[in-house]
Amino acid sequence: MNESAGTPGRWHKFATAYSALAFITFNTLLAIVAVNLLLYLVLWARDAVMALEAGRAEREIARSMEGGQVFRADGAPLPGPKRSAYQIEWFDYSAYGGDFGETEVAGVLDEFLDLGARGFVYQPWVQFAEPAVQGKHLNVETDARGFPHRRTSRPSATRDGVPTLQIFAIGGSTTFGYNVPDAQTWPSALARLLEGATKTMASPVPLEVRNYGRAYYNPSQEVVLFMDLLRSGQRPDMAIFVDGVNLGPAQDVPQFTAQAARGFSGLQFGGSSTLLDRLGWIPMVRVAARLSESATPAIVPAKAGESRDPVQLAERFRSSWAIARELCRLYDVSCLFVLQPDPVLNYEMRLYRRPVSAGFVAERAERRSFYESLGSPEGVIDLRGLFQAWGPNRKAIIDDVHYSPGFNDFLAEHIASRIDLSSLSAQKGVRVPSVPTGARRTTTGLIDPARDP
């Protein structure tokens, strides 16, 4: 009797608990829907305002361009849909120099913004490279073996029976020539200087300088690229390595290694998208993602957030140069190593159009420790003092680290003065056979750097 009497009581308690749980669950879901609806309306309004602002900025740019103005009086780009946060923050038209009109320079920035939006292509052994592009100011081509390189001033005309002197320029984004036209990189300036010099030789020879500069590359990555070029069957007469600005991550690995590792994992285990990626359409998730982006700095060459051992960095440079020398000896290639002018080390900070950040100042202190550990390496041309030779009150940097067209000419002059063309030409003869180790290379796939160069 008691058992049967107690049963309805237990069911009543269960029903009451279930009703309470259902009430809480329903109202929680209702609250989530309401919050998402509210956030959707807020995001919609925000996007509408941003679209209006972008349209207004675009009209401002159009009006300015009609009057020939694309940059503010201090050299900053006017905002607009073809301007990135990096360009607006750092680019300085007043540092460009020469006879480059505002519209022309704006066109250069447009093409570099498009280059960054395309991301990097995958390249075996070195992980990434700039993609092939064709433009008015910016052209990345592929050589006969499928390796990307930036267009330089065209090689001099070939002559029957006279082999062309070929020089490879290898380095980081300052060698590639970010934010300057093809003809204004230092490899292009070097090509013009050396071609002029060949005309004074007793037996003039045709000459080509090929630009294999890559964003973010440091000596570790460059020596692997150089080895790959040689194994592909290419045989330059000289390779010039220009380094110093890019030190690389604390680990001796290429930039974006973490992203590449995630992508590789995704290839093995069925997709790399996360639950957050798949739910990205939900307003609450969109807001969370945006807050995360605002709290996370853009991917930049390792600066903030990681400690790098200056002794290890110095050894990174020395060992890479030593390996490159042995490769040059093995394949009968002359080599030249240059410590480049490094704005993080000793460029006058007052010459930037805006005050530099505390992070930049901290990076300068780390950079000094690195160079103290490196010392004066034997067989390396030290051009770190070139900013002072250029003029302590003359601007040489057009953004945060990249050289102006005029300074590229100046740098090329100092490199050219170390090259003996007559000796280089006389050394041409029996070369290591140029038999490639594989078929012509193709580049596929993208690495999204989520950054401005």
Image: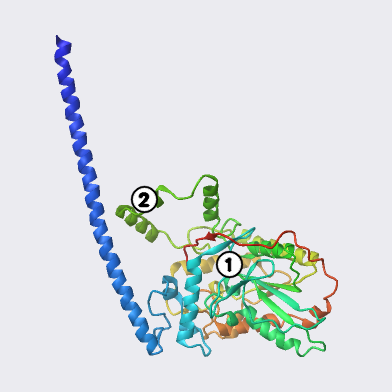
How busy is the neighbourhood of tag 1: few (under 14 within 10 Å), some, or many (20 plus)? some
| Tag shown at residue 102 | none
Q: Indicate whether 76 appears above or below 22.
A: below
Is residue 407 visible from the viewing direction of this image? yes
Q: Looking at the picture, does residue 54 appear above or below residue 279?
A: below
The picture quadrant where one finds residue 368 is bottom right
Q: Which residue is mark 1?
A: 246
Question: Going 54% across and 49% down the picture, which residue do you hit?
Answer: 267
Mark with earlier residue (2, 1): 1
Q: Is residue 272 left or right of residue 59?
A: right
Relative image position of residue 374 (x, y in whole percent): 65, 66
**What residue appears at the point 54 percent right and 84 percent down from the top-left corner?**
392
Front-most of residues 337 and 237:
237
Q: Characterize the local packing of mark 2: few (<14), some (14-19) or many (20 or more) Cα atoms within 10 angstroms.
A: few
Q: Is residue 322 visible?
A: no
Query: Badge 2 is on which residue?
Result: 279
Q: Give the residue type that dot 1 points to.
A: Asn
Residue 219 in the image: state x and y as whole percent. 65, 65
Q: Tell me where residue 23 appears, x and y as whole percent.
A: 18, 37
Q: In this rendering, is residue 180 above or below 32?
A: below
- At which x and y percent is residue 399? 49, 76
Q: Mark 2 against mark 1, which lies toward the viewer?
A: 2
Label 2 sits on what residue type? Leu
Q: Residue at x 50, y 64 (%)?
A: 300
